[in-house]
Amino acid sequence: MKRNLLIGSSLLVVLLTLAVGQFLLEKRVDAQAKGAVQAPRFEVDPMWPKPLPNGWYLGQTIGVGVDAQDHVWIIHRSDSLDAVEAAADEGTGECCKKTPPILEFDQAGNLLRHFGGKDGDGYQWPASNHGLQIDGKGNLWIGGNGNGNDGHLLKFTQDGKFLMQVGIKKQGLGPDSNSQDRFYLVAKVSLDNKNNEAYVADGYGNKRVVVIDMDTGKFKRYWGAYGNKPDDAAAAAAPRYTPGSTPSQQFRGPVHCAEPSNDGLIYVCDRTSDRLQVFTREGKFVKEIFVEPDSLADGSTWDVAFSKDPQQKYLYVADGRNQKLHIFDRQSLTELTNFGEGGHYPGQFYSMHSIAVDSKGNLYTTETYQGRRVQKFVYKGLGPVTKKEQGTPWPSKTSQ
Amino acid sequence: MKRALCVCAACALLVVSARGQSGAPTLQVNPFWPQPLPNHWVFGSITGVAVDAQDHVWVVHRGADSLEGNEKGMMATPPTSTKCCVAAPFVLEFDADGKLLSHFGGPGQGYQWPQSPGGIAVDAKGNVWIAAAGLDTAPAGRGRGPVDPDAVGPAGGARGGARGAEAEGGGARGAAPARGRGPAAPAGPPDAHVLKFARDGKFLLQIGAPGKMEGPDSQTTLNRPAAVAVDAAANEVYVADSGNHRIVVFDADSGSYKRHWGAYGEKPTAAGGGAYDPSASPARQFRDVSCVEIAKDGMVYVCDRTSNRIQVFQKDGKFVKEGFVRKETTGATVGGQFGAVSSFGSAWDVAFSNDAQQRYLFVADGQDKKVVVLQRDTLAPAGSFGSGGRLAGQFLTVGSIAADSRGDVYTGEQHHGKRVQKWIRR
């Protein structure tokens, strides 16, 4: 019975895919004829991933990466569950329980491996987890932004075997944006596999990008906003961002991403300045753009990812202040369209924090604070931009 | 046609369903209900869901008071965002397809809007009733006494939650969200009333008055009523008068007193049931009376939330039977930008299945994060649906539930859940 249903459903999906595909194709042809702008299209998959086993419940979900098998890895903060959420741990209710911080899902949304959360031989687990990326060999890199503690990053195999710690975790730690051997409150570590270099978004405390050797962890170079030498005193003295003010010569931070593209450019999120700065691999400033420059508080530029085509024609920007996924033309840095809305329903966001793209171009988002989930957005190919603000990207949108 | 196709596409994706036993209804979440709200509106903590005679769905929520700074950036001074978000109006009406039809709510002439609404009911004439339930102030089930307004405030941070949240802001000046800056509670005397509106929001009747609480024998005052139900035939409104540990019945037009009773149909006391102890014998008094619903056969179902039990009465208050949902369940009180939130208890709200006999009772079990299905005649377990989490088909604190004529079910979540979800009967 279940099987029949399944077959029936699959058939339906296939038929629908064909129908929708045909519909899109026609629309695309129409639009191309009219010379409309093309941009990647996405639809939320509301049933991905599957509910976690064991009564597990996600906390603030603050990192996502995709490996070579298109498995999706997330990191979240187990300890961010409140006593209502962690009722089973507290013995006050049947559900739920704190969950290991690093989780692996397959394409179907099944939970595979999980690990992390405690110090081990030769390494210190961060006081506050932050960011996750996967290198070409499948190893996982994580940062940490526990105030007064985390000055390090960690590298593990997919089985959770410890490989490397760079920097230290130490109580009473503070900023030192010119340190050659440790960080302060790392947001994310991104990988340039070709050159065997890791780019460290350093971060919440320090105000710089650091490049290290992926095998040895040795510091190679670092820089601040515009490629300037980072200056913690100047950064601390810089006024808070206000729309239209003279751009700060230091990163305000958090320096929340530092993502290398295929063509050797580094895209850096200066979150509370609402800006992205672009650099060469050597740290030479190339250009900057402002995203939703009216945004205050925690800012608009939370994370970036690139489209899957070899040219990485499109740049995706996660905006956890306005709850939008902005799609830019990467060359011109002009925004083509965006989707998302505030809310807890599929395709909506509460503080969209991190994003990643798989080999098929599907996009994954995580939400921190009270969002506490990972969502999958299915890549639907390029399509004409008919509306700049697409809102909540539900499948039914195709027929509205 | 295209639209029908899309609805089917949504159905094909559904995988979350009830674990049914003994013929209990099977329900699957519809992740695409309701349609996205306009104007960058978002729900606050959902306190009530009701279905009217036209199968329209009515939702009441706490609004801006229950939203964190990050959720209401457009309401901040100066705005921290121009695109997200604004509290939706307090009361919203949707059709079965999830289309927003109307909305109202907030302060007006002749009545006092609640500090926090509780349950909502729509009577046979289409009038909308809202209980003024008040804010959580102390651990429920620990003998909540009369409300002390001074006790309302941002309680100590949620264990663990504060750490991560703070760390997200990190050392970056200006990066931290507006934690602790939000108002803890609307000013004014605490809720102790029930409101009746026409479906267009025109004020019709208020029973009780904020701050005026004269105990469980009072014929004119209430104490943080959590829910209402209307008996159309008798033209009576039943009030789950939580703070007075009783059910009290009034004339639905005049608001004049008819009768009241406590647990087991006995006389309610101001002390109520006291602290809940799972191993103790059932208390002779109600603790927090959080729901009242009237079945077609005239049986009155009452949730004694923090006692984890449902009691059944005749309309005259004669006790019929009781059943327990999950006896071991207790709860927690946690703090946030919007003050304290209490999660105690497994019996928060009930709804009936749509068959002629109403064979099943759906119970919103807030602390255990699921809907429990009971056989209505025996109050024996028959299944459950939902699980804990933030994805479609999961719950945080599911506190309200209603069913329509098709047998579809609607659930509302409090705390950080802030969703109404639709469950389709298969």
Image (tube, rainbow, N blue to C red):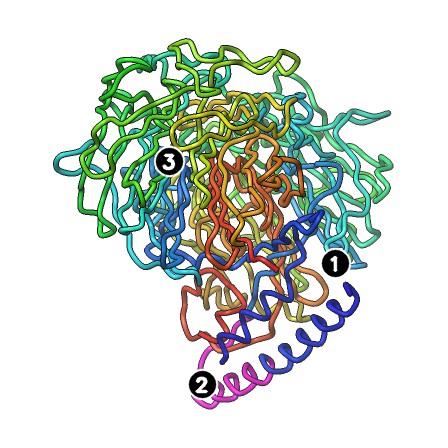
Which amino acid is tagged 2? Answer: Gly
Q: Nearer the viewer, residue B236 or B362?
A: B236
Say which chain tag 2 marks: A
Which amino acid is tagged 3? Answer: Arg
Q: Is residue A137 left or right of residue A234?
A: right
Query: Which residue is at a point 49% across and 32% down the rendered structure image?
Result: B172
- Secondary structure at badge 3 equals loop
Q: Is residue B32 left or right of residue A311?
A: left
State the predominant SS element of the stretch in magenta.
helix
Q: Quadrant of the C terminus of chain B?
A: bottom right
Quarter residue B238 falls in: top left
- The residue that disc 1 covers is A108
How packed mark 1 is, by other alpha carbons closer than 10 Å (few <14, some 14-19, many 20 or more), is few
Mark sitting on residue A35:
2
Query: Which residue is at a point 84% across and 52% down the rendered structure image?
Result: A137
Does A396 sit above or below residue A159?
Answer: below
How packed mark 3 is, by other alpha carbons closer than 10 Å (few <14, some 14-19, many 20 or more), is some
x then y, percent, for residue A272 = 44, 41
Magenta stretch: includes residue A87:
no
- The residue that disc 3 covers is A240
Say which chain tag 3 marks: A
Work out whether residue B343 can be spotted.
Answer: yes
x then y, percent, for residue A353 = 56, 45
* Nearer mark to the viewer, of 1 and 3: 1
Query: Which residue is at a point 55% across and 56% down the rendered structure image?
Result: B31
Which amino acid is tagged 1? Answer: Ala
Q: How many marks?
A: 3
